[in-house]
Image (spheres, rainbow, N blue to C red):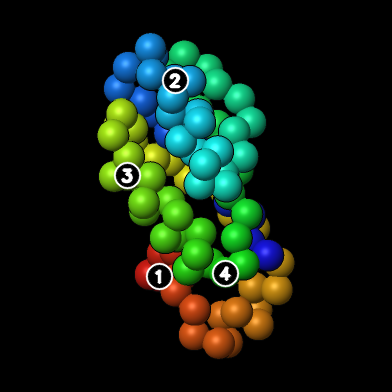
Amino acid sequence: MVFASGFVEINDINEIDKLKEELKSRSIIVDETKEEKIIFLVERETIGDVKKTLDELRDVDGIRSVYLAYYSLEGGDEEASEGSVPFFNA
């Protein structure tokens, strides 16, 4: 299982409840909100699944930016040897 946490910045504070529900509908845990930021936790099976989920958030109407704070790799060594998609090319 791969866990990733970060936050999204939204365009309009008046849409925060709608956008929280949008994240929840995508099986994203909403931990907290602060001003125009929604802090989230994503849990997916693979790095590629997490990356896809975060990339899709960029297309949500009302979300200005998506920020990744951290991610953890449970079984990451096995996944890397299977040729999964990295977050960053080093």
**Does 32 sit left or right of 7 as displayed?**
right
Residue at x 65% of width, y 79% of height:
77
Q: Which residue is nearer to you in this view: 19 or 2?
A: 19
Residue at x 61% of width, y 39% of height:
29
Mark 1 / mark 4, whichever is N-terminal: 4
Residue, disc 1: 90
Residue, disc 4: 46
Query: Tag 2, which secondary structure?
Result: helix
Mark 4, other Cα within 10 Å: few <14 / some 14–19 / many ≥20: some
Q: Looking at numbered disc 1 in the image, what kind of residue is underneath it?
A: Ala
Residue at x 57% of width, y 47% of height:
27
Q: Looking at numbered disc 2 in the image, what kind of residue is underneath it?
A: Ile
Mark 4 / mark 2, whichever is N-terminal: 2
Quarter of the figure with residue 87: bottom left
Front position among marks 1 and 2: 2
Decide: marks 2, 3 in contact (CB < 8 A)? no
Residue, disc 2: 16
Marks 1/4: CA–CA distance: 19 Å
Mark 3 / mark 4, whichever is N-terminal: 4
